[in-house]
Image (cartoon, rainbow, N blue to C red):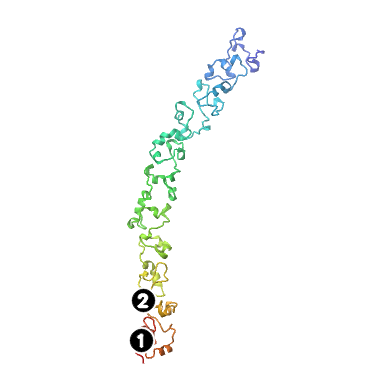
Amino acid sequence: YNNTTNPNHPALSFPTTCDNCHTTNPGWAPATFAIHNNYYLLTGAHTTVDCNSCHPNGNYNNTPSTCVGCHQVNYNNTTNPNHPALSFPTTCDNCHTTNPGWAPATFAIHSNYYLLTGAHTTADCNSCHPNGNYNNTPSACVGCHQTNYNQSVNPNHGALGIPTTCETCHTTNPGWAPATFPIHSNYYPLTGSHTTVDCSNCHVGGNYTNTPNTCLGCHQADYNQSTNPNHGALGIPTTCSTCHTTNPNWQPATFPIHSNYYVLQGAHTTVDCSNCHIGGNYNNTPTTCFGCHQADYNQTTDPNHVVAQFPTDCQLCHSQNAWEPSTFNHDGQYFPIYSGQHQGEWNTCADCHINPGNYNIFSCIDCHEHNQTSMNQEHRGISGYAWNSNACYSCHPNGESEDKRPNDIKD
């Protein structure tokens, strides 16, 4: 017992009950080793393997206690999958038991090579490794799911040219749902309210096929129910984007087709909409100048339009650029002040119209450059002469000094 070297009994603390392992045969052989499990547990294929497989040439010293110690050749020669090429650890018991043929095996370090999540955690290995082939397994979704892609109908991925990078929209959750669609703008840009609206608002019942791509396709009811203004009654086009953006509540809106209903010119092109559409009311907006500018008409003093009974058809005298200058035909209708001898001889209407409340009243003698004495002397012998404005106008209706004088009888 004390002198044994193969193996060293005292060093290994073998029991001294020799008959546990030996018979009385010469040379102590053959021997059994019923207490092998006290030193290395024999399970699976190890229970039936010949001792020489692990103890070659009957050498029981320094026998490896690690799997790779005996199975380095098996590791090196693997082809499905190739362990060295994939840098698998040599701790064989991470994946294998001692069952014969190394099967079945687990692969607890799968995520070191491909992360298993969602439905992948419960999928049968053969789904991705058909016929037990673990080489050249696809690492892209479409590598396994090309058929799913081809057979998709809601929406039809192939017809729409949706990328085959499934992970762009899908996770590994079962049934491909829920899914996102970050490439939505490749098909229809989402802006404004569209960025926060629930998908089902446009894809009713989860139907992603034949979704309208025009505003009216989704907003026909909004168009029909509009009241301010009533789009249908006015025949406003159904191309909503002409006036609206995708901002919430259709606001703010423009109206580039305003001239189809009322032509905007001059100062009207820069005036705030609320000046004509008070309180944001776009119904029954006046289409005549006076409809919006009655207050301007009533409050004018130079001249007083109401007293002078000017027509309320403003454009007869005014343009849409500004109230001044106006095109009031004073010279042709009444008395030449923009031409002839009176051109440039006055500054304001009040120079001649001394009663601002009544432009039918005018004065020649108050502003005229001649005084009464000189005028009396100059008109001596002129029939009908009198020093008053009506008499002046009667003889000089065109403002010229010789209007009627050639036919007058002088003293």
Q: CA distance from mark 1 to mark 2?
A: 23 Å
- Which residue was labeled with disc 1? 406
Of the two numbered discs 1 and 2 on the same chain, state the one appearing first in sequence.
2
When asked about the image quadrant of residue 303, the answer is bottom left
The mark lying in front, picked from 1 and 2, is 1
* Relative vertical location of residue 212 with respect to residue 360 in this rendering, above or below: above
User: Any mark on residue 90, and which?
Assistant: none
- Which is nearer the eye, 335 or 105? 335
Q: Amino acid at mark 2?
A: Gly
For label 1, count other residues whose C-alpha is less than 10 Å away and answer few (under 14), some (14-19) or many (20+): few
Kindly identify which residue carries mark 2: 332
* Type of amino acid at the residue the image marks with label 1: Pro
Q: Residue at x 39, y 54 (%)?
A: 242
* Number of other residues with Cα within 10 Å of mark 2, as a class: few under 14, some 14 to 19, many 20 or more: few
Q: Position of residue 25 (x, y in %)?
A: 60, 7
Residue 96 place in picture, x, y as percent: 52, 24
Secondary structure type for disc 2? helix
Q: Nearer the viewer, residue 239 or 59?
A: 239
Q: Which corner quadrant holds the C terminus? A: bottom left
Tell which of 9 and 239 is nearer to you: 239
Q: Residue at x 42, y 79 (%)?
A: 342
